[in-house]
Amino acid sequence: MDDLIQEFLAETTESLNALDNDIVKLEQNPDDKDLIGRIFRLVHTIKGTCGFLGLPRLEAVAHHSENIMGRYRDGSLQVTVDSISLILEAFDCIKGIVAGIAETEKEPEGDDSDLIARLDAVFEGKDAPAKTAPQAEKKKKGNKEEKTEFVPTPDQLFEPVRAENYSAEPADAAPAEPAPAPQAKAAKPATASQPATAAAAPATPAGEKSLRVSVDVLENLMTMVSELVLTRNQLLQILRTQNDSPFTPPLQRLSHVVSDLQEGVMQTRMQPIGNAWSKLTRIIRDISVELGKKINLDMRGSETELDRQVLELIKDPLTHMVRNSGDHGIETPEERLAAGKPEEGTILLNAFHEGGHIVIEISDDGRGLSSERIRKKAIEKGVATEEQIKNMTEQQIQQFIFAPGFSTAEKVTAVSGRGVGMDVVRTNIEKIGGTIEMKSIAGKGTTFTIKIPLTLAIVSALIVESSGERFAIPQISVQELVRLSANGENKLEKIHGTPVMRLRDRLLPLVSLTKILKLEETEDDRANKQVIVVEAGAQTFGIIVDRVFDTEEIVVKPVSPILKNIRLFSGNTILGDGSVIMILDPNGIANAVGKIADSPDRENGRTAEAARAIADNERKTSLLIFKAGSGAPRAVPLALVSRLEDFEVDKIEVSGLKKVIQYRGALMPLIPFSDQMTLKDKGNQPVLVFSDRDRSMGLMVDSVVDIVEERINVQITAENNFGMLGSAIIHGQAMDVIDVGHFLSIAHNDWFGVKSDGQFQKQEKTLKILLVDDSPFFRNMLSPMLSVAGYNVVSAQSGDEAMGLCRAGEQFDLIISDIEMPGMNGYEFAQKIKAHDSKWKNIPLFALSSHATAQDFDRGKAAGFNNYIAKFDREALLRSIASLGEAA
Amino acid sequence: MTKTDKDNIADGGSKEFLTATVAGQIFGIPVLQVQDVLSEQKVTRVPLAPKEIAGSLNLRGRVVTAINLRHKLGMPEKPAEMKTMYIVVEHKGELYSLIVDSVGEVLSLPDTDFEKTPVTLEASWRALAIGIYRLKDELLVILDVPGMLEALFMKDDAA
């Protein structure tokens, strides 16, 4: 409340001083509507605020003055010198009261009934109590005369006000000056503004206690102080190399002063966190009413201060979390009573300083997070698989609420569930270098702990070097530093060229700064590389750098807009030695790395990514590399794999000769990669799951090695090499690419009974399909897939080859053709086929292309294609063929 | 501005340009756009940046993005021993410096000597030039600095 009054006083004093001039102007230009409006608004504001703050005396005076101003504004009352004087008097009275409040923090005693009566008299149109000639000169001279007429002496005019206001020892207010009243008396009442000035004098303390400074000025000051800090650091650094420098004592003093200055300037930007909390009371009240809950919002440490920039950035996340607590956390009164808790739930907000950070806790005594529900949701949303979740601790499962697109609320209420999830909260907090932790006990409640830096302007950062270039990494995201040694505990190991390191009991993915920033490789210093373990988002990984220097306080400067698109940098800074270096953004690196290392993420983006890769004409294909049996690792196109699972060996059942497992409510056959493969006694069995519509099969392998994206060129091997499409050079190594179709048909065989003795029985008529594609990879991926789906597939690698088949008199039920092909492209091929003298003109023709925009579609149709399907949309292809089969 | 305004009235219009040389070609930049001229500076390379961006440098505590004009203009790399200079300009509150071989004098040029950029000029140059002034011995290409920087933003967006 104190702050509020303080603010009110400062504001009011400031405006009142400005208004003295305005009122004098009004006297000279009584018709200035703007001026009247401005004065009216001010008086109105004072009145309103007084009512709110409980200052009845001030309110009364302001109210009656406002009435007069209101009539001026309507034009129903003529602005006269008398009434202006009266208003000025009222303003002086207001100033007096304001000054009194500033001193004693409460309204000074006093009686304004006389003043109010006179104000009312004017308001009622009686003009002034003692009316003079209507043609009163609107000059200062006249003012004096009139005043002397209706108020006997200037003494009397000001004396009552003074006496009332300064009953609380006026001498104390200005001990150095003569008592204010005599001064006012001495001042010539001839100028209307002068008494006001005199009256304002004692009131100035209210204005001086706080000063309104524009944010720009503060920001500028902050920047300069930051520079000063840097220069200081620079000097200190030089000093360290000098022994017995005469500069040492003065520099140390300078250093202290600069530190104090920095703190002082920082203070000017500080705001109590309560400012960000103010609207929460209302939000919680609304939630209580809307959801029929009883919630008590307990806010502690609201005076804890933090940088206004940080405050702005955490406002929304905080609001979101409190809203969540109220909406999802706290139960209804009935539920609470049933659980043996008090009817009223409590949300506790607690803020305090800890080190250079501010810690904010948001806890509720509600129902806590339901691990069961999170588990279900995680599986449903595809965030994790059943098998993964089984091995997770309660704590790990709860962390899923921070996963993108995750919301546990079973129904979306008006209050929450607006699509902003905890992932956004986490991202926002991490953006400002903060961390968020969560603890939840079912039935007892949930506590979120947010830790954020006090300011964003100066951060402590680790300076590192790679390939001769230096970079800064914010200290807050650095967990530890590990020196790589050639042999021993911390040695760099590689899985298929991807560096990893064993750190205590886990495997730490590594990323080389040189590689990710595309710096020139340097051969030296290999053995002494350092790994910086950083945590960004949900990921922990190590960044390999050549050298680590020490930590430095750095001033974060935004990067030039031209470089904004390089997401790996969060800013740049100027070091002590004056050089500019880039600040690495661990989140940006995590995202860049995630594309390579984070498999669940990729699974979602798989199709899009694959399509993009194709669109780039790169023909890069994602391949899953696994080991099975003896020999080199094998590869399978990732597009064909639905899931990777790790099944416990005990769960695998043997039915007849086949192994099966209960998977998603059905039995899934498990096929060993080779006949020599035997089941382990215990532990987990890695399985690649292939699904086709509602059918699944699992391929048991020894281990999954890696996922790579490669341009592959499959060299077809002998026909009878069962299970292999051929081999390809992947990462410089020859690997067998497996034929999924082969394994599917093994699983298929006894499961669906489609193929009992090499003949298709399911469909009355087996469709014969001609597949035209120049890419052996696609031919070899699609052919088995279509074969498994029960079609008879013949493939051709070019339009010319296909036309050869046409001339040879072959007949097909369907032709599927690629668009981009060397020589005759798909459109030309289609025109040829659909030409009226063609033998094939009545055969349905499908286009299969990576270009699937509306224009492509139209062009395809125009060329004669009956259907146009995106290359990676296997489902659509199968559906289209199936509908064709039904029609036939 | 006041001086040029006065000049305009006096002699029927003229503008002032800072001249600079890049690979033998003389360029002009409107004097009012120039904030500073710097001699040899330590430039920190920015990894992953477009090739026209030479890096960042420190100008009295402000970070300035250095732009390699030779790259931008499709000119040959400068010989290693050749010295460079930096013309600092401000664009939308950010500082940029154009790396040039040398900086010449400031010329006050009459509007009558101004010509539009010849249409036959290579497209990349046409996009960067506002026009040409006929000097006594050579032709001065006036650089469109804001346009060039904007183009860099665009390029970056596309990347």
Image (tube, rainbow, N blue to C red):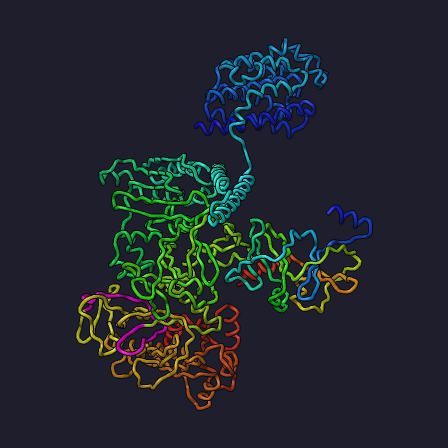
Instruction: In the displayed orientation, state which residue is furthest to the right.
Output: B11
> Going by the image, does A266 lie left or right of B8?
left
Give the quadrant of residue A490: bottom left
Please state which of residues A861 and A426 is positioned toward the viewer in this rendering. Answer: A426
Residue A634 forms part of the magenta stretch: yes
Considering every residue shown, the one lying at the far top of the view is A152
Placement of A381 over or under A169, stated as above or below: below
Residue A555 seen = no
Q: Where is residue A390 in the image (x, y as percent from the top left)?
A: 24, 59
Residue at 46%, 20% (x, y): give it: A106
Spot occupied by residue B32 in the image (x, y as percentages of width and height) = 69, 51
Would residue A585 be visible to someone looking at this image? Answer: yes
Which of the 4 quarters of the picture holds residue A188? top right
Q: In this view, does B110 lie to the left or right of B29?
A: right
Number of dots carrying numbers: 0
Task: Report the side of A536 relative to A569 (left or right).
Answer: left
- At horizontal 57% and vertical 28% (from top left) the residue drawn is A14
- Above or below, comparing residue A622 to residue A125 in the picture: below
Magenta residues, as a range?
A: A626-652
Q: Which residue, as the protein is rendered here, is positioned at the far front?
A: A244
Which residue is found at the position 46% from the left and 29% from the top? A4
Q: Where is residue A347 in the image (x, y as percent from the top left)?
A: 33, 39
Residue A324, compared with residue A845, is above or below; it is above
The x and y percentages for residue A259 are 47, 40
Front one among A261 and A883: A261
Quadrant that contains the N terminus of chain A: top left
Residue B98 within the segment the image draws in magenta: no
Q: Quadrant of the C terminus of chain A?
A: bottom left
